[in-house]
Every structure is written in structure tokens, then in C-alpha cells.
Image: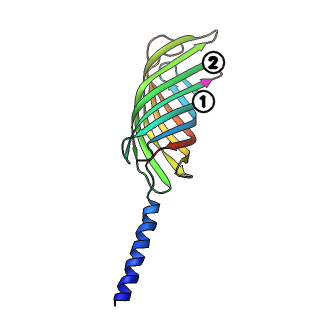
Amino acid sequence: MKRSVLILGICFAFGAGVYAQEAPITPLAEVGFVYSGVRIHSSQDGLNLNENGGAGYVEYNLNRTVGLVGDIGAYNNSTFDQTTMTYLFGPRLNLRKSRFTPYVQFLFGGARAWSNTAQFTTNQNAFAAAFGGGLDVNLTNRIALKPIQVEYLMTQLPGLTSSTDSIQNNIRYSAGLVLRFGAK
């Protein structure tokens, strides 16, 4: 009987050690570099544009679930020679698992658009917000792959054909690489 209890105790001890190894490490900070494609829909101009570019972000994790994100991106449409830049900040809610980290985020900030073609000239700052989520796939404790991040990106920039502000209901898709630093 004592021998069975001893063996059972050893199994539980090793099992707890294996389980502890599966717990994901919460990084102190994360830095991401992503490709971003933006589908811009302006109800005022009736224009639908695709812009391609990239973004970078820094996330400071307050705890295992909540992080604060700063995201800066730039996107270009060669047809109208229009460039849009976004600078967004806000909270991210993470659900950290051993291999996957799904998340949602709510970002607020601004957008700046400029174009210097013969037809249109704009150079304006306006309010912007992004709401959405994505998935990080952990390759190691320090590197993750971001196969998908999809967000509703709202901007209030003036239209290309007029100077009055309008609301653009955009979709932003991103994918890239995440580097993680430190541990909590």
C-alpha cells in the first residue's frame, strides 16, 4: 500500500511538472511587423480603393490577458498616388494558450492622408478607430507568426473630390511576425 501511494505521488509530481511546462509565458512586451492591406470605402466620393503597406506595433502586457498597444501603419494606392498613415492606441485582450494566442483589440487615434496628383490634392489629419482581432501562433517563446488580423478601420478623412470630412468604412487585413521580450 505504501509503495502504491509513493508511485502515485511520483506520477502526480511529474505530471504537475509537465503541466507547468505547457503554461505559456506572458511576455513583458511584444513588437510586431506586419503587411497590411486596406480596403477603403468612401461613401462621399463613391470610391473604393485598395491600399497596400505595412504596420508596426508595440504591446506592453499589464498581465496575462490585458495589454496596451501602439500601432503605426502606412498604406499606398498607386492609382491615385494616395498615401494613408494611421496612428492608433488602445487595449488588447489576449487569450493565451500553449500554442495559440487569439485576441481582440479596440484602438483609437488618427489618420493622415495625402495625395499630390494632377486631379486631387489633399493633406489632412482626422480621427480614426480600429476594432477587430487576430491570432498569433507561437513558434518559440520569443517568436510568433501572425497569420491573420482583421479589423474594421473607420477614418473621418475628407474625400478626394471634396474638402468636407466624410466617414470611410474600411477593412484592414494584416499578417506578419511578432517578437516577444521579457516575461511576467
Checking the image for residue 111, the label placed there is none
Mark 2 belongs to which amino acid? Answer: Asp
Q: Magenta: predominant secondary structure element?
A: loop
Q: Is residue 93 magenta?
A: no
Checking the image for residue 53, the label placed there is 1
Q: Residue at x 43, y 45 (%)?
A: 103
Which segment did they paint magenta? Answer: 76-80
Q: Is residue 5 above or below residue 25?
A: below
Q: Is residue 5 above or below residue 82?
A: below
Is 51 displayed left or right of 59 in the figure? Answer: right
Q: Picture coordinates of residue 85 (x, y %)?
A: 53, 23
Local crowd size for mark 2, using a 10 Å CA cut-off: few (<14), some (14–19), many (≥20): few
Quick check: can you spot residue 2? yes
Q: CA distance from mark 1 to mark 2?
A: 13 Å
Mark 1 belongs to which amino acid? Answer: Gly
Nearest the viewer among 153 and 137 is 137
Query: Which quarter shows the N terminus?
Result: bottom left
Q: Picture coordinates of residue 100 (x, y %)?
A: 49, 53
Q: Picture coordinates of residue 130 (x, y %)?
A: 43, 32
Between circles 1 and 2, the one closer to the viewer is 1
Query: Which residue is labeled 2 in the image?
Result: 81
